[in-house]
Image (cartoon, helix red, strand yellow):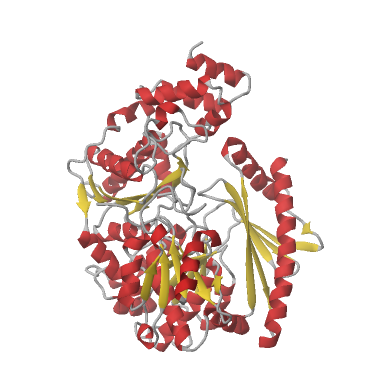
Amino acid sequence: MTTLERIQAAASAGKIMPSTAENIAAFLSANLPAWAAASIDELVAQEAWGELNDRFYRYLEFGTGGMRGRTIGVVAAKAETGKLNAAGSPEHAAIGSNMLNDFTLVRAVVGLARYTQKVLKERGVTARPRLVIAHDVRHFSRHFCELAASTWTRLGGDAFIFDGPRPTPQLSYSVRLLKAHAGVVITASHNPPHDNGFKAYFDDGAQVVPPHDKGIVSEVNAVPLGELGGYLDIQLKGVTTLGRDADDAYLAVAAKAVIDPSVFHKTKLDVVFTNIHGTGAVHSIPLLLHAGCAVHEVPEQLNFDGRFPTVKSPNPENSAALALAVALADKRHADLVLATDPDADRMGCAVRNRAGKMELLTGNQIGALLADYRLTKYKELGWIPKDGSQSVCLIKTFVTTQLQDAIGRGHGVKVINTLTGFKWIAAKMRGYEEKLTHAMGAGFDYEATPFAVRAQLLQQYSTFYAFGTEESYGYLPNDYLRDKDGNSACVMFAEVCAWVKSRGLTVPEYLDEIFLKYGFYLEGVINIYYEGASGSAKIKRILDTYRANPPKAFGDVTVTKFEDFGRQDIRDADGELIPKQDLYFVTLSNGYSFAARGSGTEPKMKFYLFASAKVEGATDLPDVKAKVRKTLDGLIQLIEADAKQRAEG
């Protein structure tokens, strides 16, 4: 029996999905390299049907974070593993239509190139399409970067790559700096080591949104597998390598995240920083040193390493990932721990409380502290009116703490809620930029206009973006770039901590000040992981049943409102229609609420819970915190149990 006959027999017997059999057959007919064909033969001979299903049941899709997938299989074929290199990477990224490998990556680049060429033609632009590519430290990241650049130049474009690993925010800025038409980052953010990803950006330096995302996907899907072989060997002739000048340009704008540099001179801030083996040390350390902080790196985590050997997960949201940094902070009696994820677009931290213990903050808490501080400082310095203005905005996602809505209202500024993913925040920023550019007329150069002048013009003719954040540890201080920035977040939060320290307070005490002013807010997150083809079906079942049969109650707490973002017309504070998405927002009879959605970047179902309560005074705050937490914990258990029941059908 041939490999193809065995696959067809497995499909007939129900051992693999029909789509799996179809996609494997397509790959086998595409004149694969010998190692790739041998890998499929090997997995079929092992009857690794579950593995083949997970690898081939679909093609990778663009989600809120682009395209992510495994590069190393759960069951690895010897033909693809080959000889491990010094960094522990297999010889080849694992074969599969649902894997991130040479084939799916080239297909994505070809689709992106053809879509970009089509857009430029429609705009009457005759220039060669320009692409900037950055990559992190993961398995195959440099290889994928060079393969993407080689493919783009073969298709008639100009490609720019960095001389080594660089963070996602630098890519976002560099697209604008180089006036490129598109950008790509090879990263899977804080996913496990076996994953990698392909994030696509357009000419504004933001991740693609409709209609561009759907247009790119359409072009990608139209690329026949048989065409990919011509691009698999890498040729870097004509590819431009970016170096120190590009770093200096990005550092200059990242440093502008600081609103009031004088706070660093009022008190000495002692900071422990970890990049958790990723790209953050390239820029975060110079930024902090330049601001005036004493910086201590975690030596065990300083070197680039895609295996992330010192942590279970390179995620600065997790306490375990910060354990070495916290230990060093205690040893040195430091004020603050700052950490970035592998591509340095997210930042997590720990602060010292009044008892002298290091305390981890959530992304929601960090965002709220930054929002309140920055609006306060903008008012003190005269950048925005003391009473606020509806021409000044905070932008956050619907699944980010409602404390920020309260902070925005308290400061008299507009609060815009967007769908999950920083690309939606960037889309609002692009709209504000375009409105000002239109008002100013021909000859106005948005990028060349000094930031202070731009801020006033935006308030006069459009909307000034004061700060943007999402609960998943993403923050952006201004509109020089268009994606969350862990490097500028480090120096932004260090500014807050220096200001708090100069007042004789701790950061948790400043947070309590905010609670006393606006009420106590607490959030919870439920992550339910479902891997592979069967897992995808379970996530779909939860989403489908929420729409068909919305929950009515959880224990004695009833549902008072159910919003379906996939079916209802929902508008933001600017009156703009929110794009349709499988997101559900549920309001409960006790005033709490939660959102439910499938993750766009990981195989999981996510629930975001929001609780709040009034606080009469400082003496009441501890009891209010305890009561809200107990109630929220009970709801988490009920919502999770209901979701798991729905997943099983």
Task: Tell whether 463 sits left or right of 171.
Answer: right
Q: Is residue 32 visible?
A: no
Task: Tell whether 250 sits left or right of 25.
Answer: left
Residue 515 in picture, x, y percent from top left: 61, 80
Looking at this view, name the residue that lies furthest to the top.
Answer: 1
Residue 56 in picture, x, y percent from top left: 50, 31
Task: Tell whether 36 sits left or right of 617.
Answer: left
Looking at this view, name the residue that lies furthest to the right.
Answer: 556
Residue 197 in picture, x, y percent from top left: 42, 46
State the residue at coordinates (48%, 12%).
Answer: 2
Which of the 4 quarters of the picture holds residue 588? bottom right
Q: Nearer the viewer, residue 178 or 99?
A: 99
State the residue at coordinates (43%, 47%).
Answer: 307
State the residue at coordinates (35%, 66%).
Answer: 284
Looking at this view, name the residue that lies furthest to the front.
Answer: 331
Q: How many labels were placed on the picture?
A: 0
Residue 314 in picture, x, y percent from top left: 47, 55
Q: Is residue 493 visible?
A: yes
In the rendered view, would you say 263 is above or below 647? below
Image quadrant for the C terminus? top right
In the rendered view, would you say 595 is above or below 140? below
